[in-house]
Amino acid sequence: MSLPIQTLTLLHRNREVAAELDSGDPERRAFVVVLPLLSSVAESPEAWNGDRLREPSAVRGYEVRYLEHEARFTEEEWGFDYDLVLDAETTRIRRSFVDRPEELAAALSPWLDDPRRLRHANFLDDAVLVSSPITTYLDDPEGRPHLDGPLSASRPPQPS
């Protein structure tokens, strides 16, 4: 199944999309997030209008993130203090990357059976990790090695 045009439009406008998943444990929450990977303004000036994306040609790929953490870490409860969530030894994150929108459904399939469930990430009460700028932290695996630890028993393995 391919992604709905509304979802692709959000991604091509530099918007993250996400869906909450069944974590299998009421004390935990799980999400899948898709982030567009963009060329910089310097690389593709024609695709940008100031700091806003004007043309989808600047999208050079996509990152799919699986996030799992304690249920207490919600925006309402914790605000945007993603350091606390990332430091929690029970938080888990998996990442995969694809080049083309046609590859997204397959990349999502280990966690999400219906891509129509994806919506703008700001509509979830988990902006703690779902829509926080955590890429820099994730690009440093030495900083928080526990993030790559075992997933809950109810979760499928990371896609290869």
Image (tube, rainbow, N blue to C red):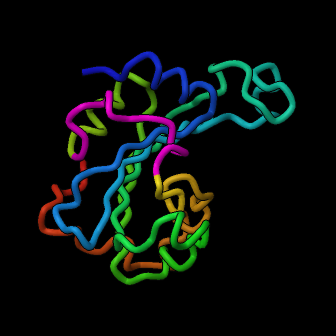
Closest to the observer: 77 or 29?
77
| Quarter of the image that includes the N terminus | top left
Q: Residue at x 38, y 35 (%)?
A: 118
Judged from this view, the residue extending furthest toward the right is 50
Q: Residue lying farthest left?
A: 153
Left or right of 140 in this view: 98: left
Q: Which residues are magenta?
A: 111-124
Q: In the rendered structure, does residue 152 fall within the stretch colored magenta? A: no
Q: Kindly identify the residue that appears in the image at 63 percent across and 20 percent down.
A: 56
| For residue 52, side relative to residue 115 (left or right) | right
Which residue is situated farthest in the front direction here? Answer: 76
Report if residue 123 lies within the magenta region: yes
Q: Is residue 78 above or below residue 6?
A: below
From the top left corner, tell me how far across and down residue 140 is, in percent. Answer: 55, 70
Q: Nearer the viewer, residue 145 or 3?
A: 3
Residue 40: which quarter of the image? top right
159 relative to 90, above or below = above
Tell me where residue 30 sits by quadrant.
bottom left
Q: Where in the figure is residue 48, as x and y percent of width and height? A: 79, 26
User: In the drawing, does residue 117 fall left or right of residue 25?
Assistant: right
Q: Residue 42: image x %, image y %?
A: 82, 34
Count how many numbered circles sit on residues in the image.
Answer: 0
Comparing 108 with 82, the one in front is 82
Residue 50 screen position, x and y as percent: 87, 31
At horizontal 42% and vertical 43% (from top left) the residue drawn is 18
135 sits to left or right of 69: right
Considering only vertical position in the picture, is 99 above or below 77?
A: above
Residue at 24% in and 55% down: 158
